[in-house]
Image (tube, rainbow, N blue to C red):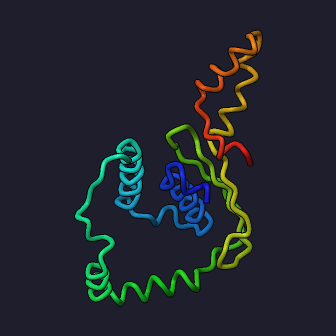
Amino acid sequence: TRMDYLSPIFNETAYCLGVEKLLGITNDVPERASVIRVMMMEFNRISSHMVALGGGDGLGNSLEHIRQIMGTSMEALIHHFKIVTEGFRVPAGQVYTAVESPRGELGAHLVSDGGTRPYRVHFRTPSFSNLQSTSAMCEGSLIADVVAAVASIDPVMGDVDR
């Protein structure tokens, strides 16, 4: 999906925070998990600047490496498969949560009907919000200045076209 393109960990964080609020477990999340979440967001920000560099041991795609992982953690794989296929019930309700993403505030609005899947999920992306200031920035300017004004916002048009 287009939500996987630009800083996907920020989108997932906004979604996870919303689910935690719906479940009422925001106070039950360990401090360590919150710190790890922030660290992962920062690592994602760093890695987005280093996309051109290769790394790793090259074993990620080898069949032998995959068999070794499956042999050592088959019980965990079964457990995760069961959670993914069956899901878990989230209480009915709605929540809005926001996180700071590279281009501004990213918000996620989740609505649950009490089932295993969300009834509605809507992301409020920073590019869409930032582009709303274009008319105020261009007031009293020449048409040629609109290009510079939009470029200074640096929007991602995949976020805006919704």
The answer to whether 2 appears left or right of 69 in the picture is right
Q: x, y percentage for residue 79?
A: 43, 86
The answer to whether 101 appears left or right of 123 in the picture is left
As displayed, is residue 52 above or below residue 20? above
Q: Image quadrant of residue 135? A: top right
Q: x, y percentage for residue 138?
A: 73, 17
Residue depicted at 63% across the width and 79% down the height: 89
Q: x, y percentage for residue 21?
A: 59, 62
Q: Nearer the viewer, residue 21 or 100?
A: 100
**Count of numbered circles on the image:** 0
Q: Nearer the viewer, residue 80 or 97?
A: 80
Residue depicted at 54% across the width and 37% down the height: 103
Residue depicted at 59% across the width and 65% down the height: 19
| Identity of the residue furthest to the left in this view | 57
Q: x, y percentage for residue 87?
A: 58, 81
Query: Where the N terminus falls, by quadrant?
Result: bottom right
Q: Image quadrant of residue 77? A: bottom left
As displayed, is residue 95 above or below residue 148? below
The answer to whether 124 appears left or right of 60 in the picture is right
